[in-house]
Amino acid sequence: MIRSATQGEIMRHVRGYGRSVSRAQLTEHLGVSRSKVSLEVGQLVGAGLLVEDGLGESEGGRRSSLLRIPRGAGLVAAVDLGATSADVAVTTLGGEVIGRAGEPADVREGPNRVLGRAVELLSGLLDEQGANAREVIAVGVGLPGPVEYASGRPTVPPLMPGWDSYPIHEAFAGWYDAPVFVDNDVNIMALGEHRGGLGRDVENMLFVKIGTGIGCGIVVDGRLYRGSQGSAGDIGHVRAAPDGPVCACGNVACLEAMAAAPAIVREAERIAGLERGGALAALREAGELDLGSVLKAATYGDAGAVGIVRRSGRLIGETLATLVSVLNPSLVVIGGGVAYAASHTLLAEVRSAVYHRSLPLATRNLPIVLSELGEDAGVVGASAMAAEGVLEVHA
Amino acid sequence: MIRSATQGEIMRHVRGYGRSVSRAQLTEHLGVSRSKVSLEVGQLVGAGLLVEDGLGESEGGRRSSLLRIPRGAGLVAAVDLGATSADVAVTTLGGEVIGRAGEPADVREGPNRVLGRAVELLSGLLDEQGANAREVIAVGVGLPGPVEYASGRPTVPPLMPGWDSYPIHEAFAGWYDAPVFVDNDVNIMALGEHRGGLGRDVENMLFVKIGTGIGCGIVVDGRLYRGSQGSAGDIGHVRAAPDGPVCACGNVACLEAMAAAPAIVREAERIAGLERGGALAALREAGELDLGSVLKAATYGDAGAVGIVRRSGRLIGETLATLVSVLNPSLVVIGGGVAYAASHTLLAEVRSAVYHRSLPLATRNLPIVLSELGEDAGVVGASAMAAEGVLEVHA
């Protein structure tokens, strides 16, 4: 599809820019001659990967025509699997979401069932749009566990029976004639927020997901940093206190075991048994004590629930302080189900711990903000990963 | 000097390879045509930046001639300032050390005096080699505190009066007509170990310096990662325990305040006052209790001294475990005065804490080893930074 490294870079730049791009901008961005850009763009227009899109702002001389990626350039199938949810989207190669679906899913049911259901959801979306599976030119998949990016296979995922080394791409092979790119869910969320959300203009960024687990996606110099085995960013199993509960990984006092969703519910159960009055005791009485009700009670200001959320925020913030000191990012984005439901109380405590514990130089201009894309960050990122991946493949 | 980006890349590759390089290797490395490589190499040979250096191994056909960087291509002045030492070296552009000097120095005496003395040491080395200051084409400087890399100025260095925002390059302006590149000492040590030591074949590496302070240099995808304000890797002020002594930075229980050289001496004083018999009490009696004697007592197996070194190693290892989980490097190199003097006991404890506390995936094949370059890592890295910097400057 792409015939040179320069063509891939042109396509990625147009995709990332979010609006139509002029040849002059491409010339400046690529640092090559105007004639070279015209030649390569001409081939891309000829191949249907770019189309002319009106005239841009005048830049002194005549107005230059703009370029964008048309829907006909191809579609991308994006899959974001969480521990308890499956989200899918169909996007254009340019990144526009043209269909979106999601439903509860239990990753422990195994790859056949969960991936099979994702394909069904995608087929439904393609049908709705009158699109054909042959139009899909790349598939991006996020999984709720460690992934060896080069091979696209999960590696020893905790609590995911049947997924270890499972060849994810084969689940899509019968459906799409397209390469499949796989990464963990936190990395694709970070990529989504960087390419299509708050991180657009930022070189170095952290994305922290707080949900059933806790993880961190790291963007370094504009690119996702995966580490040597692809496990970079796994902050869930950093020790968060001198002592604490035993984690599923076998260590004690892991951040995840002390501050993620299950720990919040467990702590709420404990406090509901101790306190008199208070929302938590009442919820337990009514048999309605779960993550959602605890986080809602916190937003209403119930002291017991607020205390639990603050404790999580403080523990996460203390670990994050180390990352901020060590990586010196210019933006921290917080996402994940717990963060969306308990945003203000949780974020205030995370910020407080980070600003208090990190070096002043590292936090001088450091915004710590809630994800802009929210539940869409995963599919937006899966689409970006797949589109950028397929645009790197050339003769 | 360098007339295109490709020429800069050729020169950096020849420099980094460490041995003479054939045109065929360059063609493969650059991914451009053989004729383009020949053209660019011809210009570099013409400019005296490369010379032919005999014939390489046969590769099926005729043997190809090899290329290396001659001394005549230019010299690099390398300066590595620690809190208590000044080391300098003169190297070729190709990285060969042709002169080396060092002496105790107190960074608190201020930039005029300390940098002036470094220039004197460099002049002595140039004289010894019969070289002229006009041959120096780049200067690389490492400082024992945070540096804003883009401007080359120190930023609010703790315990370095007079250095804040000092224009380091001006100290060299009257001596060399050459660009000056400045970074913190830990970053240049990491670069030295990556370019000329154990890290040569590794993409992602951490270099931990344990001396008067504690810091970490981070190599990501083969390049030094400096972060948004240049403070990346500053692990010295990560909190290492729930409570502890007040640090010079104002926080409590910073890793540096608990595990670096001053903390080791302080702890030795405390234990010498408590124990009966033992080397530490005897050393204090003799008025000889200092960092060197404590670390030596540890290598002789004195229980009190071993306990102190182990405590430092454990605290450093626990913080390092977080970095290893988060960054998933494929090599960790340990350097700095404390590490060189107490290597085995300290490293054993660091390893134990990292392997125990990090994710199995991140430590599966992770060597944690002592620096190969030792006290030379700084000047080797300063030379590499300056050479690579000047080779990026082109028309």
Image (tube, coloured by chain):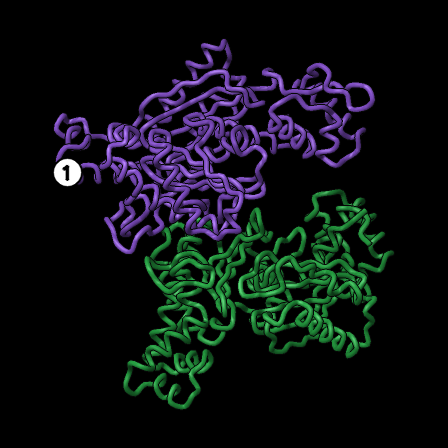
Chain colours: A green, B purple
Residue at position x 36%, y 61% from top? A353
| Mark 1 nearby-residue class (10 Å; few <14, some 14–19, many ≥20) | few
B235 above or below B26? below
Q: Nearer the viewer, residue A358 or A34?
A: A358
Specify the farthest residue to the bottom: A286
In the displayed structure, does residue A316 sit left or right of residue B204? Answer: left
A101 above or below A383? below
Residue at position x 51%, y 59% from top? A216
Q: To which chain does the residue with label 1 belong? A: B
The answer, for residue A278, to whether it is visible in the render is yes
Specify the farthest residue to the right: A46
Q: Position of residue A89 (x, y in %)?
A: 69, 71
> Which quadrant of the view contains residue A155?
bottom right
B126 above or below B279? above
Assign the C terminus of chain B to one quadrant of the image.
top right
Residue at position x 52%, y 29% from top? B197
Q: Amino acid at mark 1?
A: Glu
> Which quadrant of the view contains residue A383?
bottom right
Q: Position of residue B350 (x, y in %)?
A: 39, 42
Q: Position of residue B272 (x, y in %)?
A: 16, 36
Q: Nearer the viewer, residue A161 or A103?
A: A161
The answer, for residue B150, to whether it is visible in the render is no
Residue corresponding to mark 1: B275
Q: Secondary structure at mark 1?
A: loop
Q: Nearer the viewer, residue B120 or A121?
A: A121
A362 above or below B121? below
